Image: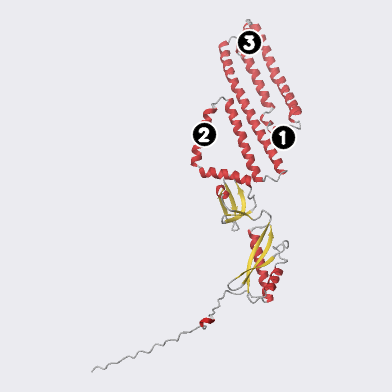
Amino acid sequence: MQTWVDNVRSTLAQFVSTEERIGISAALVALALGTALYLAPRAVSRAATELDRRVLEHPKVPDAVNDVAWMFPATIVVRTLQSSIFVGVSLSLLWLWGFETLASDLAAIVTMALPNVAKIGATLVLFAAAIAGTNVLEAQLESYAKNSENINAHQQGIAFRVLQVVVLLAVAMATLTVWQFEIGGILVGAGFLGIVVGMAARQTLGSLIAGFVLMFSRPFELGDWVQIDDAEGIVTDITIINTRLSNADGEAVVFPNDRVTNAKIVNRTKRNRLRLRLDVGVDYETDIEHAEDVAREALTDLDFVESVPEPQVMPKAFEDSSIGLQLLFWITNPSAPRRMRAKAEVLRNVKLAFDREGIKIPFPQRELLAREEADGFKLRNERRSQPVKKSVSNED
């Protein structure tokens, strides 16, 4: 750069007469105006057209590359070229008319500024590449998710965020390298900071790791009806920190993910159907087979009970006051409201059927019997208390 400046300075210094300087000045101004106002816009426009036609519109170039073209409009390129031309002409005119000190100072400033301008341009290119890269990753991930059953919407979202963070960190490190920052010191400081944060937020980090475990193990998905320990509800949100349920009462239940991974999880919608159980007792004098047939008939043609698989009625146990029957039936699209309505419908229909057939559902009762070898019950004779006679003393 300095050699070029010296050559220009020595060439312009050869023109000593005023007439020559005026002629050279007019020629330089005319050349600058013609180049900056006529040639530069047309050259940039032609180059942009060729870039679109030969590169960006090629079928192998992802659409995400076109999405970041707005960061480098042709207008900025044209204005940059025009500014460079005018700065060069201005320095030449200063040297031509003998203002060498001022021209040298301005040239030194421009020389120092050029590397920073290049760094700014490289930074813009890196961030444009980051945006294009994340867009390409998102498109590829969506395409993979549509054609695969191994990844759901929640996993897709978390995977994209992780990849996005990785790309942005890589671009940030590259940008620091361009600006000649000492990355080693930054990494050491980040390492100590990570240790401090890790010690202060062990539970949060545990939930964070558990969130990734849930993402890949997939015990449940959004919209599933699950039971986690003693709480049940519909899964409304799964983040990398916690899991949210909405129970039948409209309450929001929030579980940290580290607790979810260590809890007993029951997913009631995994197979899109659920078997329910309802117990009923009949009198010991009732014909059990007849009671089974009546109960089984009462489970048919109901709104919430599926006919396939068929409902079942099974004797369960000899209970204190009755013989226990267990009613087994299936529902589809299981949820807490459907379970409640199905049980209410079955209970109502079975009770009406038993009433029609005269099948008794006994109350709890106790029967007292005495052993024969003990000669039955013995009642103790009641002891009647003798009335107490009150003595009356006559005082003289």
Instruction: Give the percent coordinates (x, y) of residue 26.
Output: 67, 12
Mark number, residue 191: 2
Question: Which residue has dot 3 on it?
Answer: 8
Question: Which residue has dot 1 on it?
Answer: 63
382 and 276: which one is in front? Answer: 382
Return the residue found at the far front.
Answer: 373
Callout 2 crowding tier (Cα within 10 Å): few <14, some 14–19, many ≥20: few
- Which of disc 3 and disc 1 is earlier in sequence? 3
Q: Quadrant of the C terminus?
A: bottom left
Instruction: Give the percent coordinates (x, y) of residue 28.
Output: 67, 13
- From this viewpoint, is residue 96 visible? no
Name the amino acid type tagged 2.
Gly
Question: Between marks 1 and 3, how big is the CA–CA gap?
Answer: 46 Å
Callout 1 crowding tier (Cα within 10 Å): few <14, some 14–19, many ≥20: some
Q: Secondary structure at mark 1?
A: helix
> Residue 216, relative to residue 381: is it above or below?
above
Callout 3 crowding tier (Cα within 10 Å): few <14, some 14–19, many ≥20: some
Instruction: Give the percent coordinates (x, y) of residue 199.
Output: 49, 40
> Residue 186, relative to residue 369: is it above or below?
above
